[in-house]
Image (tube, grey):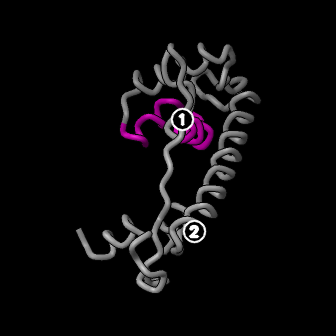
């Protein structure tokens, strides 16, 4: 492990000046909802639904994400069963194309909003408690 990694892991023993501003830490969060029936929703389901919306196809979405069609279909159907709603619907006039249902669009929008709220709180709290600059994952990918 690098010296900087040790500084991040033990901030109470590290002077504020020891963490260089150009060496900001990246906050990574994992958040999902599950029930006794299985995973309800999380980032993986969100990305799957976004890919379906972009490609208009569960098959294309699963291929882009490197998963089997069966796995993608199973994840989608598990969430739909637990929630009691359809997250996708067939394009009218197109036998094989899919788009997000209004419920699917709403779930994606609300999950992203919740994730943004959680990350914002976590970033503020991390900087307060750890006395170092921290940025979110999206910003870290751009840097």
Is disc 2 surrounded by few (<14), some (14 to 19) or many (20+) residues within 10 Å? some
Nearer to us in this view, 88 or 97: 88
Mark 1 = which residue?
32
Q: Residue furthest left?
A: 1
Relative to 34, is 11 above or below?
Answer: below
Give the residue displayed 61% in from the left and 54% down from the top. Answer: 119
Is disc 1 surrounded by few (<14), some (14 to 19) or many (20+) residues within 10 Å? few
Q: From the viewer's perspective, tell me whether residue 104 is left or right of residue 54.
A: right
Q: Is residue 116 a member of the stretch shown in magenta? A: no
Q: Residue furthest front?
A: 13
Quadrant location, the N terminus: bottom left
Look at discs 2 and 1 and give the one toward the viewer: 2
Relative to 120, is 2 above or below?
Answer: below
Give the residue displayed 44% in from the left and 84% down from the top. Answer: 20
Give the residue displayed 53% in from the left and 25% down from the top. Answer: 34
Going from N to C along the chain, the mark reached first, 2 or 1, is 1
Q: Range of the magenta residues?
A: 45-66
Relative to 34, is 113 above or below?
Answer: below
């Amino acid at each position: 492990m690098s010296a900087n990694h040790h500084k991040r892991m033990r901030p109470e023993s590290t002077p504020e000046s020891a963490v260089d501003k150009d060496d900001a830490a990246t906050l990574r969060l994992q958040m999902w909802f599950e029930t006794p029936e299985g995973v309800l929703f999380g980032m993986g389901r969100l990305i799957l639904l976004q890919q379906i919306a972009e490609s208009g196809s569960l098959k294309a979405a699963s291929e882009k994400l490197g998963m089997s069609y069966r796995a993608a279909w199973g994840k989608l159907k598990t969430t739909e069963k637990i929630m009691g709603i359809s997250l996708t619907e067939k394009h009218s006039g197109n036998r094989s194309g899919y788009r997000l249902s209004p419920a699917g669009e709403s779930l994606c929008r609300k999950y992203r909003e919740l994730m943004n709220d959680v990350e914002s709180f976590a970033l503020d709290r991390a900087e307060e408690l750890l006395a170092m600059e921290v940025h979110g994952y999206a910003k870290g990918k751009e840097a």
